[in-house]
Image: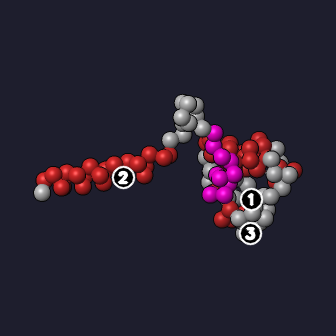
Amino acid sequence: MKKSLLSTIVLGSALFLAACGGGDSESSNGETAELDGKKVVQQSCATCHGGQLQGGSAPALDKIGAKYSQEEILDIIVNGKGGMPPGIVKDEKAEAAAEYLAGLK
């Protein structure tokens, strides 16, 4: 009985740790993995700006790089503008999102 309980606990812990272990930001060679700006935008911006960034309850972003520079986009993400509240995306994620959005022209 004790051996069975111990086996169950060990197996459960191993499964839990395996499921939680995939979020490291380092690649196998020890370098920090680059954030995917497109994924950040899809996760954080698509709700208001549309799944294809075509606009929705917020302006379209599908060609935002033709209107604003990367620095200007980052400023809008960090500080907000118009109806967009500040700080929805922060730090490295904000920088990755701004870089991706600046490329949409």
Q: Residue at the spot x=72%, y=69% of the render?
A: 57
Please report whichever mark, 3 or 1, sits nearer to the chain's N-terminal start: 3
Q: Position of residue 65 (x, y in %)?
A: 83, 49
Quarter of the figure that contains the N terminus? bottom left
Which sits in the foreground, 61 or 76?
A: 61
Q: Residue at the spot x=44%, y=45% of the render?
A: 21
Residue that lies at the very extreme toward the left in this rendered image: 1
For the magenta stretch, what is the residue range?
A: 34-43
Q: Quadrant of residue 74?
A: top right
**Camera-nearest label, 3 or 1:** 3
Q: Is residue 88 visible?
A: yes
In the image, 58: left or right of 69? left
Which amino acid is tagged 3? Gly
Using the numbered discs, state the Cα–Cα distance from disc 2 to disc 1 in whole angstroms: 46 Å
Please report whichever mark, 3 or 2, sits nearer to the chain's N-terminal start: 2
Crowding at mark 3 (Cα within 10 Å: few <14, some 14-19, many 20+):
some
Residues tagged 3 and 2 counted as in contact (Cβ below 8 A): no
In the image, 101: left or right of 25? right
Using the numbered discs, state the Cα–Cα distance from disc 3 to disc 2 in whole angstroms: 40 Å
Report which residue position mark 2 lands on.
15
Which sits in the foreground, 105 or 85?
A: 105
Report which residue position mark 3 lands on.
56
Which amino acid is tagged 2? Leu
Report which residue position mark 1 lands on.
82
Please report whichever mark, 2 or 1, sits nearer to the chain's N-terminal start: 2
